[in-house]
Image (spheres, rainbow, N blue to C red):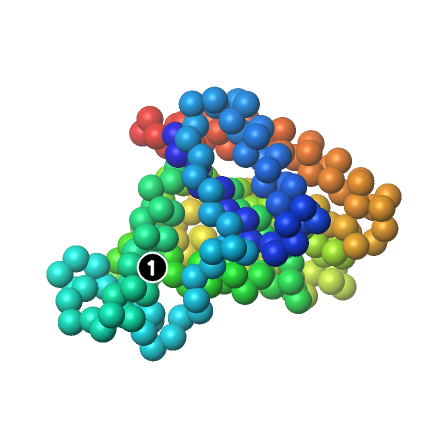
Amino acid sequence: MKLLHIDSSPLAGNSVSRQLTERVVAQWRATHPRTTVEYLDLAKDAPSHLNIDSLGFRAGPNAGGLSDVQRRENEISEKLVSQFLAADVVVIGAPMYNFSVPTQLKAWIDRVAQAGRTFTYTDKGPKGLATGKTVIIASSRGGVYSSNPAMAGLDHQESYLKTVFGFFGITDLQFVRAEGVAMGDAVKAQALSAADVTIKALTTTAANHAEAALAA
């Protein structure tokens, strides 16, 4: 089984989402020690945002006639989408920044959102092509949004991730959430403790789903 571990927070050791992804991956490996892990740190190695040279993905025979800049950008996009598609399990650290996701994570999503690779359009509408994967999102938030109706409308973080990975055909999408981490030490400690409980339960269930998908 192949696991892709992605972090996007630039806060290094102070990042809650990085703590969560580390715990998720450690728990997964403890349960399934033969899992191979590939790591991608978007805070250190993020692709550039889409521009005229990187917009428009080309693979195989369609990769001809490109400028040197376009070729380099195309190679980056191809490497990232191939890495994503090769993974059976993807663990993503996604803190909430200004009600959405970090710009580094958005840049990665824009590179893997490729027609013909992760989705396609049919006469019945769009169809996801990245099926059979388990995606676990480690979501950290300074405030509390999931249980507060007054704040729920401001959530363009988890709602966006549900939409985009659903568009890719991901049906096994799980969240490990730590909320209120900016609301004092006691609230933060409680949030991390609750996240640990979720991690232990979720990794066992998600691992069973992943193994079933591999055996299908």
Q: State the residue at coordinates (69%, 32%).
A: 197
Image quadrant for the N terminus? top left
**Which residue is nearer to you in this view: 212 or 196?**
196
- Disc count in the image? 1
Q: Residue furthest bottom?
A: 52
Q: State the residue at coordinates (25%, 66%).
A: 71
Q: Left or right: where does residue 173 sit relative to residue 197?
A: left
Quadrant housing residue 191: top right
Amino acid of disc 1: Ser
Element assignment for label 1: helix
Looking at the image, residue 210 lies above or below residue 45: above
Q: State the residue at coordinates (69%, 61%).
A: 152
Quadrant housing residue 156: bottom right
Looking at the image, residue 171 lies above or below residue 95: above
Q: Left or right: where does residue 173 sit relative to residue 67?
A: right
**Which residue is nearer to you in this view: 121 or 72?**
72
Looking at the image, residue 48 lies above or below residue 5: below
Would you say residue 63 is visible in this rendering? yes
Please give the residue where the numbered disc 1 appears in the rendered image: 77
